[in-house]
Structure formats: C-alpha cells, structure tokens
Amino acid sequence: MTEALLWLRGSPLTGILLTLLCYQLALKICRRYHGHPLANTVLLASCMLISVLLLLDMNFEQYFRGASYLQFLLGPVTVALAIPLYNNLARLRSHGLPVLLTIFFGSLAGVALAVLCAQLAGFDRALLLSLAPRSATTPIAIGVAEQIGGIPALAAAFVIVTGIIGAVAVKPLFDLLRIRNEMVLGVATGIAAHGIGTARVFQISESAGAFAGLAMGFTGLFTALLAPLVVGWLL
Amino acid sequence: MIETFLYLLGFQFLGEVLARLAGLPVPGAVIGMVLLFVWLCIRKGVPTPMREHVPNLMTHMSLLFIPAGVGVMAYWPQLSQYSWKMVVVLLVATLGTLLASAGFMCCYLYLRPGKVKHHD
C-alpha cells in the first residue's frame, strides 16, 4: 500500500491523469450550470486538483512532473491561434486600426490600474512592481517583473489569478453591459486576461477567441515595452 | 494530426529561434503565431490537416492552463501573507482593464463623428 502510494506520488502519469479527470468533471459541471459565473473550467478543475493533491499529500513539484507535459502544449496551441485569426481576416482588415489602438490603450490601462490600485492599498515597492505586468502572459510578466525590480515568482502567481478573474468575470460583465460585439469581447478579454481569458472566450465563439488571441499577443509586446515607462512615470 | 503538429511545432521552433536571435521580449510561441499567420496570408488558405484538427484543439485550450491554475498552490505561502487587500486590488485592476478596453473600443466603433452605419 505504501509502495503504491509512493509510486503514485512520483509518477508523471498521476499528474496527467488527475488533470484530465478534473477537467472532464469541470466540463460536465460547466455544461450543467451553464451561465453561472463560477462555472469556469480552469477555476473549478484547479480547485478540485488542489484538494486532491492535498488529500494525497502530494506537492506541486510532484504534480508538475506529469502536468508539465500538458503545459508544454500551450506553445503549439498558441501558434495555432493564427488559424482562427486567419479565418477572421476580413474583419481584421476592416477594423485593424481600432483593434490595435484598443490593445495599446488597454495594455497601458492594465499596467497603470495595477500600479495605482497597489499604491492606494499601500503595498510596498517590490509588490507593486510585481503587480505591474500582470495582464501579460506568464513568460513576459516574469521577464518584465525581473527587469523593473519586482519578484518574478509572485508576478507569475498574479498573472494566473488575474487570468482566472478575467475569465470568470467577462461573460457576466458583458451580459450586464449588453455588449454583444464578438470583436470587442475578444479584444478586451485578450488584453485583460491573456491566455486563460482567450481559452474562455473560445468556448463562447471562435471569432471572439481569434481576436482574444491577437490581443493577448500584442498586449504581451506592449506590456513589455510600456511597463517600465509607466512605472517610471507613476512612481 | 502528425502534419498539424509538424506545422505548429515547426512554427513555434522558428519563433523561438527568431526571438532569441533578435532579442525580442515576446515568447517564441507568440512570434510563431505571427509567422504562421503571415504564411497563411501569403499562401491564401489553411492546409486541410490544420483546418480539420485545430478547431478541436482550441476548444480544449482551457485544459492546458489548469497546471498553471494549480501553480497558485505553490505560491500560496507568498500569496497568503497579503490580506484581502490583494484580492481587491487584483479584482479592481482586472475588471477595470476589461471595462477600459471594451469602453475604448465601443467608443471608437460607435461614436466616431461622421459614422452613421453601425458595425456588426
């Protein structure tokens, strides 16, 4: 029994199998409670997995031995975002300028809002600088946090929490404001909630997902370029 | 499926190499996405294997973010020392970014002077 448990904790199979199981379960729950804001696959599956790992007395490193294979696939899937984007080429052609301007403005707002809110809350400098790049994807945020004097590990955690908040909030928020334009939905989500938000809007519509993917890519670029400047102005 | 992954991993590889050669602050996968997009525009169409498999792949993109979501557990000791204030800051900043971006774009699309016809 103890031997089996030891194998289970150390094997990459456990991490992959548990992730797929929790994802499947989360999908079922989300389909059933369709429309409930908390019915979000990343949020539900992550909470379930954390509980299971605590029950099995497994730490994150043990879990990640298997889960890293799934995370690796984020690379090729990010590349694949080019296909839905290409399918929306006509819309992109006619709205290229507003899309690009919105992403620029939104990236700026993302960094500025984080810094201002953190200042109001009275956070110390290192914490504030770790919050600044939270709208960008994880690798960019880590790089930017390092460059401006934040704490990279903390920045990575803020990125994920930001993505989950955005992914959970976007549908109810846009329903409330009666915004039905898929392009606006996609672009805003890609700016505010990077890949986790993009994955969420892909469940709503392919066009929204395409624009979210585009916004995610450019927000990363703009955040990397703008965050050091914005932090310089505001501090 | 093999062909699809050959394309995707191939373009990611090109992106990673280019990012390092040019010293760009953007992940290789994002550059790979741009390269593939440009290539599709030049080619004027999506190769059949990708057109068949990619939509399926995209619907399950959420699955791939779950390890990162669980990663919050690893950062818990650092995160839990900041009180409820941190939750409020992240909530306000994220919702604010969503609203600011959507507001900006709606204003641009609908309120531009001289614009009579509404966009879809």
Image (cartoon, grey):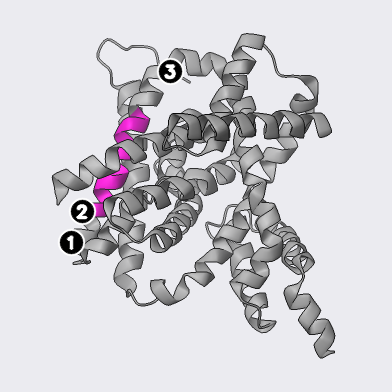
Name the secondary structure under disc 2. Answer: helix
Q: Secondary structure at mark 3?
A: helix
Residue at 36% over, 66% down? B87
Is A57 magenta? The answer is no
Chain holding disc 1: A
The answer for how far apart the CA atoms under marks 1 and 2 are is 6 Å
Q: Based on the displayed image, in which of its 4 quarters is residue B53 positioned?
A: top right
Q: Nearer the viewer, residue A44 or A61?
A: A61
Identity, as a three-letter code, of the amino acid under mark 1: Leu
Whether labels 1 and 2 share one chain: yes
Q: Position of residue A132 (x, y in %)?
A: 30, 51
Residue that label 1 marks: A120
Position of A230 with respect to A175 (left or right) is: left
Which tag is nearer the camera, tag 1 or tag 3? 1
**Residue A109 magenta-highlighted:** yes
Tell me the residue at 31%/58% (across/down): A150
Of all chains, the one bearing label 3 is A
A10 or A115: nearer the viewer: A10
The amino acid marked with disc number 2 is: Leu
Which residues fall within the magenta stretch? A102-116
Tags 1 and 3 both on a single chain: yes
Q: Residue furthest bottom?
A: A2
Tag 3 residue: A95
Q: Which residue lies most toward the front here?
A: B21
Contact flag, marks 1 and 2 (Cβ < 8 Å) = yes
Mark carried by residue A116? 2
Return the x and y of residue B93 as percentages of the image width and height: 31, 53
Label 1 and label 3: CA atoms lie apart by 37 Å
Assess disc 2: are there few (<14), some (14-19) or many (≥20) residues with their C-alpha within 10 Å of its C-alpha. Answer: some
The image position of residue B12, as x and y in percent, is: 62, 34
